[in-house]
Amino acid sequence: MEKYGRIAGLAGLFGVLIGLFIYLVHADQKVAWMSAGGVGVAALLFYVIACRDEVIAAFGSRSARYGANMAVAIIVVAGIVAAVNYISVRHPLRWDVNAEGIYTLSDQTEKTLKGLKAPVNAVAFFIPEDNEYNKLRDTFESYAYLSKQFTYEFVDYQKKPEMVKTYNVTKTGPRIILRSEGREARVKGIAEEDLTNGLVKVTRVGGRKVYFVFGHGENAIDEKGEKGYSEIVETLKNEGFEVDKIVLATTPIPKEAVAVIVSGPQKPLLPPELKELRDYLSREGHVMLMIEPETNPQLGDLLMDWGIEIGNDLIVDPMSKLFGAGATIPVISQYGSHEITKGFNLMTFFPTARSLSSGAKAAEGVTPTNLASTGPTAWAETDFAELKGGAASFTDGKDKKGPIPVGIVATRRNPSSGESGGESRLVVFGDSDFPNNQFRSFSGNGDLFVNSVSWLARAEDNISIRPKKRAASRVFLSQTQANLLKYTTVGPFPPLGALPLGLFLAAFFIWRSRKNK
């Protein structure tokens, strides 16, 4: 009887360890770990009954006293570990050691989360079996780590159909709902960019309307071709702006306009339209002018009031060829000290840009600042015939040598508003193609445009570098390597792998050798 009891005791200990291991590694496999643990406990009870004299004697031996001391030490260590774990949960610290930084949130996301002034709750209709579940949960945890105002919950749409109906959620529609102070935003994608855009929408109070002027051959905001602005307009909408068109010849600029954009007019603006822009700027308005080379929209006099001149030229940059671009697409990597470009370390590409300068005498109270400039290898070519012939070269005394400004910002404070009063704001670019559908995704092109609109609209909290799609680091194993890893760690059934089984057997033989001594 005692012989079988000892065998049962060994098997019971092994069963309990198997159950504990399965619970730690695969807690969702309840049948497996509960069965192994239950059989193990039953076997140990049989050992205690069958070998009760041996068990009683063991408790009175010197090894039992050593065991008691060891148990006390284990309890103390467990207490310390528990205390450290409690502190880490209440005050967590995280580091992203991934080479691609895939677990690091973008500047815009951090700024948005840290700027939350009201609680935001995310309700996600996903179950653990969904492919997107784990990635979405990790992203939510990163958001909650940065802001206590952000909370989230997952809803099992299979078990709670009444919530699915209440929130009007469909399988193909948005399955993430952000709520804050009675407002709601629905998010379809699970990427950081989608979630952050949803945060901006649900926390934005009041509309911010941006008007694009049209009627002079400007870039069409609803065109989906390469020259259109449909994609950058969608980005503006995701940032919480409302976008509309306006004809200045027939419609005064509305009071709710936070910015007016004149993007690449091919024909001159009429005198009444120019007056409307001037009047709007005098009322602390915010305007962006994007002027293409070889066009004359009659904006020169307006710009002179702000100390800005536009060159009748086309910028050539031989460095562009290193990036696979043409020489008439200058690479912009020099930025002025301004809120728009604060922390901005991305290159931008300006297809067919003209030069700007801020050397003219500005009106009283106007402060112009160079925003973006070419490198020193570029120059502003004034001989268009030579350019079209494909033999352009720098001519000293005639062409301007780089660095050449292609973007200038200017402010004009309203004296009647006092020290805390408002100001008029103007952004001028010597190109209108860099944010279009073809070039918007080139490096920092889209970010520079959206940052400029955000500054004009006094939405400085929007100014940052938007989330980019990043690829996770992956390790590719052959079938042989995968099998070796599997059978070394977990085996055909946890924990029958070589590593855990070997550790258990080593511990058993050490125990037996010490007992025999």
Image (tube, rainbow, N blue to C red):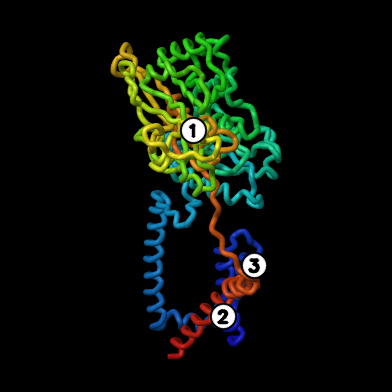
Q: Which mark is residue 353?
A: 1
| Residue 282 at x, y percent in the picture | 40, 13
**Residue under the point 38% across and 58% down:** 84
Q: Which is more toward the observer, 339 or 239? A: 339
Q: Is residue 39 left or right of residue 413?
A: right
Q: Amino acid at mark 3?
A: Ser
From the image, which quarter does the C terminus lie in? bottom left
Q: CA distance from mark 3 to mark 2?
A: 17 Å
User: Mark 2 — residue?
Assistant: 10
**Residue under the point 45% across and 40% down:** 393
The mark closer to the camera, 1 or 2, is 1
Q: CA distance from mark 1 to mark 2?
A: 81 Å
Local crowd size for mark 2, using a 10 Å CA cut-off: few (<14), some (14–19), many (≥20): some
**Residue under the point 49% across and 17% down:** 298
Q: Amino acid at mark 2?
A: Leu
| Residue 439 at x, y percent in the picture | 56, 38
The quadrant in which residue 379 appears is: top left
Judged from the image, the secondary structure of the residue bearing numbered disc 2 is helix
Mark nearer the N terminus (3 vs 2)? 2
Q: Which is more toward the observer, 38 or 432? A: 432
| Residue 199 at x, y percent in the picture | 52, 35
Q: Which is more toward the observer, 423 or 515? A: 423
Judged from the image, the secondary structure of the residue bearing numbered disc 1 is loop
Judged from the image, the secondary structure of the residue bearing numbered disc 3 is helix
User: Mark 3 — residue?
Assistant: 35
**Furthest residue in direction left, as rendered:** 419
Q: CA distance from mark 1 to mark 3?
A: 73 Å
Q: Is residue 365 left or right of residue 220?
A: left
**Furthest residue in direction bottom, as rendered:** 517
Say whether marks 1 and 2 touch (CB < 8 Å): no
Mark nearer the N terminus (1 vs 3)? 3
